[in-house]
Amino acid sequence: MGTVVTTQTVPQASPTPHASRRQVLELSWVIGVVVFVIIRFVIAYSTLARYGRMTVIVFGVLDIATAVPYALGTARVVTGLVDRRIGYASRWAMIACASFVAPYVWLAWAGREEFPAVAYVVIGVLAVLLGLNALIGIVRNVRNEQRPEPRLDEA
């Protein structure tokens, strides 16, 4: 006599509304960062191409290639801190930092013989301002997510 095997399908749990919201916010953040990086590349190219066209093109390619890990990194730092998963947040912070710094380091190194001193000052100031903006945004987003949601009966 043969063995009867039955298979049961286990219904897949749908993501919670909170998880879905996080995924939508993360995806929109990644898209926004990539669009910003492309716009920044166009501006950088039009400004720096006269000093070294190929240097600026490679910067743009590197900047666009690191935009997605940077955006995912900063988004996941926020969710890791909100969820109090410090190790998770730390790993993504390292990825975000490396992705943020890589294009600027390459641009500074590759343009060392072509760019005037004022280009380094402008690039440095922009990098510092954009980095500070990212840190402020992370802190703000963590604080906003950690606030208790208002209860409907308190309205």
Image (cartoon, helix red, strand yellow):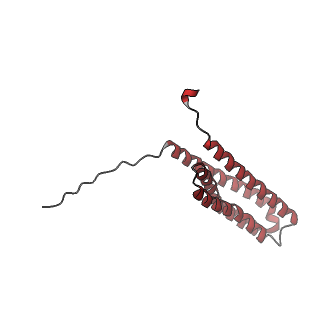
Residue 58 in the image: above or below residue 16? below
Residue 22 image point, x, y percent: 56, 47
Which picture quadrant has residue 63? bottom right
- Labels in figure, total: 0
* Residue most extreme to the right: 117
Q: In this view, does 10 lie to the left or right of 26?
A: left
Residue at the (75%, 68%) spot, across then down:
55
Residue at the (58%, 36%) spot, across then down:
149
* Residue most extreme to the left: 1
Residue 81 image point, x, y percent: 61, 51
Residue 100 image point, x, y percent: 69, 60
Q: Nearer the viewer, residue 13 or 63?
A: 13
Q: Is residue 1 left or right of residue 88?
A: left
Q: Nearer the viewer, residue 38 or 4?
A: 4
User: Quarter holding the N terminus?
Assistant: bottom left
Residue 155 image point, x, y percent: 59, 26
Residue at the (27%, 54%) spot, across then down:
7
* Residue most extreme to the bottom: 113
Residue 97 in the image: above or below residue 143? below
Q: Which of 37 and 69 is in front in this view?
A: 69
